[in-house]
Amino acid sequence: MTNRNTRWRPMTPNDIPTADAIGEIVHPDFPEDIAVMKNRFALFPQGCFVAEGQDKLLGYAISHPSIIGEPAPLDTIITLPENADCLFLHDIALSDNARGLGLGRRIVPLLTKTTLECGFHRLSLVSVNNSLGFWQSQGFIILTPNEKLAAKLDTYGKDATYMVLKLD
């Protein structure tokens, strides 16, 4: 499969079961109930995307408005903060079939566009699974955590790092 045969598109409700199954395979150390994905989609569908190729899903990306330095806890139903100041990439998962197709790089412009359309100038995420170098190559910088953020990052695993892409 080549890059030409793959694309990111907006997620639909019908994509959620397959996307959830991909998440269970890709992120076994970060299990989340399917209700979490449904919650994020219901709150902010314009921030939810799926990667597809040859009529099958290869991955997904879920984002929503948030507050810098205050990522949502894993496996938790949320409400959107009224004082949101960034778009937060809650989760991205790409199946083994998606590896090497450039889908990780190609989601960043979509998320950047969504961030700016919301009137935000920062995109944030928690880097896990040794992905720090990839996100740095996309322009994200590490935000030094305060005590509250450091405690929350501990729930994401030992290599969890909070990162921000400034779009100013």
Image (cartoon, rainbow, N blue to C red):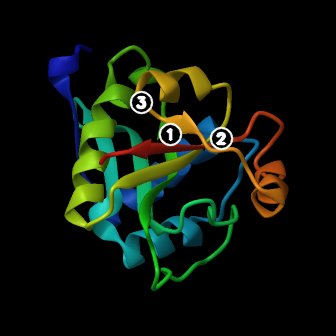
- Mark 2 burial class by Cα count in 10 Å: few <14, some 14-19, many 20+: some
Relative placement, left or right, of 29 versus 123 is right
Q: Nearer the viewer, residue 96 or 49?
A: 49
Furthest residue in direction front, as rendered? 168
Mark 3 or mark 2, earlier in chain: 2
Relative placement, left or right, of 5 versus 20 is left
Q: Which residue is mark 2?
A: 27
The span from disc 1 to disc 2 (Cα, nearest Å) is 8 Å
| Camera sees residue 14 | yes
Residue in the image at 71% along x and 53% along y: 31
Q: Which residue is mark 1?
A: 93
The amino acid type of the residue labelled 2 equals His
- Mark 1 burial class by Cα count in 10 Å: few <14, some 14-19, many 20+: many
Mark 3 or mark 1, earlier in chain: 1
The amino acid type of the residue labelled 1 equals Ala
Q: Which residue is mark 3?
A: 139
Residue in the image at 57% along x and 20% along y: 133
As helix, strand or loop, the secondary structure at mark 1 comes to strand
Residue 64 at what x, y percent from top left? 42, 65
Task: Judge depth for marks 3 and 2 and give the one in front.
Answer: 3
The amino acid type of the residue labelled 3 equals Gly
Relative placement, left or right, of 130 versus 158 is left
Residue 145 at what x, y percent from top left? 73, 50
Tag 3 and tag 2, C-beta contact below 8 Å: no
